[in-house]
Amino acid sequence: MEINVNPVGQVMVIEIAGEIDSNTAPQAQERILPLVQPGAKILLDMSSVEYMSSAGLRMLLSMYRQITRQNGGLVLVGLAEEIKDTMSITGFLNFFTTRDTVDEGLKALA
Amino acid sequence: MERIDIHPTHAHGVFKLRAGRPLPFGATQVEGGVNFSVYSRHASSCTLVLLKKRQSEPMAEIPFPDEFRIGNVFAMVVFGLDYDNIEYGFRMDGPYDPQAGHRFDSSKILLDPYAKVIGGRDVWGGQPDWNDIYQHRGRIVFDDFDWQSDRPLEIPTEDLIIYEMHVRGFTRHPSSGVKHPGTFAGIREKIPYLKELGVNCIELMPIFEFDEFENSRLHPETRELLLNYWGYSQVGFFAPKAGYAATGKFSMQVDELKALIQDLHNNGIEVFLDVVFNHTAEGNEHGPTISFRGIDNQTYYMLTPEGYYYNFSGTGNTLNCNNPIVRNMVLDCLRYWAAEYHIDGFRFDLASILGRDPWGAPLPNPPLLENLAFDPILAKCKLIAEAWDAGGLYQVGSFPSYGRWAEWNGKYRDTIRKFLKGDMGQVGEMAQRIQGSPDLYWWRGPTASINFITAHDGFTLADLVSYNHKHNEANGENNNDGSNDNDSWNCGWEGPSEDPNINALRSRQMKNAVALLMVSQGIPMLLMGDEIARTQQGNNNAYCHDNELSWMDWTLLKSNADLFRFFKNCIAFRKAHAVLRNRTHLRNHDYVGSGYPDISWHGVRAWQPDWSGGSRTLAFMLCGKHAHNGQTQDNYIYVAMNMHWEAHQFELPHLPQGLQWHVFANTMATPPEDIWEPGGEPLLEDQQQCLVGPRSIAILVGK
């Protein structure tokens, strides 16, 4: 799994590539959580995420809650159809704001 | 503040360990690791086996050190495990002495009886690796689903309208149009349908992990693969069937099922589970050793003095439910589903077995049933017993209920079926069944009676009116299986017919059935698909058919739209009228001073029912002022039932001044005049009498 961080104006755009599971989720958290300041705006570009396990979904939700607690915002962008479907079926999708493209995601966080 | 007891104290190879805690049983995530706890009264030692997901060779075998044992419980924490990717099991060592009841075999890897997730059948029908020595494998559960504010609905029992459903059968047919056919996710997509129909409770046929390949075989002639489709044979009691989940291939069935239940609850629909504690999937001494037999055979099974398996379930073995250890496991199981999955109620298959002692004798005060009736976590769950077993114990009306258990009222089913087909001598029985069977439950009330005409066992409603005999040849048992006492009537021809008269009669009979069900005191239960005339081509025991024979065909919703409308309005009628949903028995006299008894009986002459043996006509009137013991005001309701083959004029009882009879339903009339929306009933032209056609029912509302 790879993570790239690019600030775009006020927003932290974070690209994740590969699989998010019990092995890689802790790394993702370690990389991303330090970027969460009060009022932080974070866009997770998930278009290169191939797979998320139960542990991965939980890490994502947990991160979302920490961001929200700091009055920040989080948007998930580019979720693959199958992953979005899985998140919907398991009750995880409801918690998140999602968009199809980075541009739409940036607008949602504005 | 960090706990001070979370650090390893021992090691086995690369694995760091520490003494575990006996509770909770099973595999539980703790700080830094997993706590494994398993008990066995007669095992001499136990080894934890760890495997990488789906691999055939174990990754590690860690014996439980003896100093980690508390009493008969082996408990151990293993640190640093990858929750997503490991599977676990146990090897138990002990005596092999079948006559004494011991069948320990340390060459087998055993499934944890408390496994909360079970792998090995992740996708329904996926070809197993038959060489795999460990077929059903325990996995680590993520049990932190966020229910938010969800809670069991606690719908008053008398208000329930139950829909018995097979998870896969409900949406597997291509015509269902759902994204994930045959799954929990599929049911979710059909919630709008269930709401439109109006049911407020779904009873799911077994969802605990079972092996669809159990007893799988090819039909001797057609060579079709027959599977264990219904699932009345558990591999484990704490895990939902992976093959019923669209996300089963990712091991996310726990979250998927919880999300389904949450969504159903949000839409006002309760969820009951059909639970099978009378036997396991291990069969008798010739069956597979999956779990219980190897963990502690003598504790879990009812055994004969020679060490063979008693068979009160008809399936090979009988779970020893009144053994104190097993009793606790059953209690743990139900508490787990009630607390962790927010289940609203449980229906117990062959429940009479739960009242037998370890040697099979019926107990007058069975400890297990008593425990369940008084348990605090289960206190608001509905408990329903199929009050018989395969060993001859028939307890409808006498099941040890402790004031809590309801029963599948087999007598209701039998009486209604006989009455519907025009048998003689039924009117007296009908009077009892319509009132919620006070003859059986006089000290309990109508809520003890689950009224049903059809269920998964037996004909569908469409087949009940189309076949005189069962046709189970497709099961490959020479039509010997399935009940012969169907009390069905084919309306003049066996099987499908082009004759419009026969089809009109069949349609009318189905409407008669649902009308009777909805105006009876007690709790109605419908069979999935009866509302659209689902047929199994006369097969009354379709347990092995994972195919179009048993899948719900959604195209029937269009072709039988009239029937669906009739069901929907009957259900709405029941919900609209409190006088149909009493908690206590009707008294047959006037105790509020309305001038009318709470229920009164009539025949073709008002106030003069014909109770004679040859009578096939009966009517009753419910006084709206007596609803809920007089606490609720409702309309008057009059129901005329004519199961004779000729039409009859029913003289109508007079209503109080100012009220008039309106027609809610008349099964003889052509749709859309066969039924009206509750509240929209037209005025009956002739207030003195009502012509009820042959084999028809008329329902009037006095307002």
Image: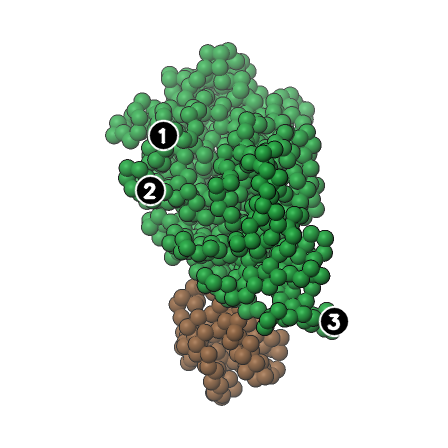
Chain colours: A brown, B green
Q: Can residue B700 be seen in this view?
A: no
Q: Is residue B296 above or below residue B411?
A: below
Report the front residue among B88 and B550: B88
Residues at marks 1 and 3 touching, judged by CB atoms closer than 8 Å: no
* Residue B101 x, y percent position in the rendering: 60, 40
- Label 1 amino acid? Asn
Q: Where residue B203 sits in the image (x, y, percent)?
A: 51, 43
**Mark in the foreground, 2 or 1:** 2
At label 3, the amino acid type is Ile
Residue bearing the label numbered 1: B479
Task: State how far apart marks 3 and 2 are (Cα).
Answer: 58 Å
Q: In which quarter of the image is residue A80?
A: bottom left
- Marks 2 and 1 close (CB-CB < 8 Å): no
In which quadrant of the rendered view does residue B502 lie?
Answer: top left
- The mark that comes first in sequence, 3 or 2, is 3
User: What amino acid is found at the position of numbered circle 2 in the picture?
Assistant: Leu
The residue that label 2 is drawn on is B218
Question: Which of B177/B347 is in front?
Answer: B347
Front position in the image: B203 or B213: B213
Q: Mark 2 lies on which chain?
A: B
Quadrant that contains the N terminus of chain B: bottom right
Marks 3,2: beta carbons within 8 A? no
Quadrant of the image occupied by residue B505 = top left
Chain identifier of the residue bearing label 1 in the image: B
| Residue at numbered disc 3 | B4
